[in-house]
Amino acid sequence: MNTLLRSGDTILFQGDSITDVGRRESPDGLGSGYVAQLAGLFQARYGAAQWTVLNRGIGGDRTVELLARWKVDCLDLRPDVLSIKVGVNDVWRLRGEWEGQTYVSAKEFDTNYRRLLDQARTSGIGRLVLVSPTVIENNEDQELADLLEERAAQVRALAREYQAVYVPAREAFVTALRSHPEVQWTSDGCHPTAAGHALIAATWAEALGV
């Protein structure tokens, strides 16, 4: 087992709709995506009391919205381990505004992400997991695909700098799309199907050795 996770830890998952997946309507607060799958995996392998899992993903969020709610939905919760998966909406807004949200440049993305990490570290959250943003349009939109590659590279670099575990979710999706094109990995080119969420969960678990 990766030494990042310790018995009794609280693990907080943060992000956008890919993390959210109906968690506010879910009795356990975990939703029906990769977070719930990981929580089930943890219990199946290590027992119900090993770790506490929290989900605070909100659909539509960019790094901008995460910053706006970071104190209440992250810092005040005082997790032992923080997992962040964000970036799809920062890029996707290039194709049009949504509820006043606009495209987030690479420079702003880096600045916002660093603020998230710095605030987490300052508040005592020392163990970090950074998940690369996944696909949009199954990589059929080359411009968005290139921007996502850029964001994934930024997340990888931040993971090295902040000594975080990097979860190569985007890389796993790109490989899966090429290896098994017959599988429906997303419902709309962005939001994962059950298979897509299973791929994220498996990639996360492998990166952390659980």
Image: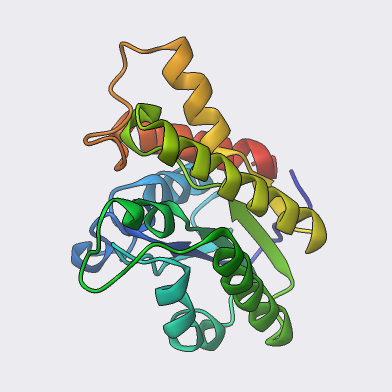
Residue 108 appears in the picture as rendered? yes
Query: Does residue 151 appear left or right of residue 199 in this picture?
Result: right
* Nearer to the camera, 33 or 61: 61
Question: What residue appears at the point 49 percent right and 79 percent down from the top-left corner?
Answer: 67
Q: Quadrant of the C terminus?
A: top right
How many numbered marks are there? 0
Say whether residue 46 is left or right of residue 88: right
Q: Residue at x 22, y 36 (%)?
A: 188
Tell which of 26 and 124 is nearer to you: 124
Q: Is residue 193 above or below residue 125?
A: above
| On screen, residue 42 above or below 5 | above
Residue 179 % position (x, y): 47, 11
Q: Which quarter of the picture shows residue 75?
A: bottom right
Residue 60 percent coordinates (x, y): 29, 63
Tell me residue 125's x, y (percent).
68, 76
Q: Which residue is at the front of the view, 49 or 149?
A: 149
Task: Using the rendered image of the protein, determine whether residue 9 is visible from the camera's viewpoint.
Answer: no
Please tell me which residue is depicted at 30% across the width and 34% down the height of the picture.
Answer: 194
Residue shown at 71% from the left, 51% from the top: 165
Q: Is residue 38 left or right of residue 24?
A: right
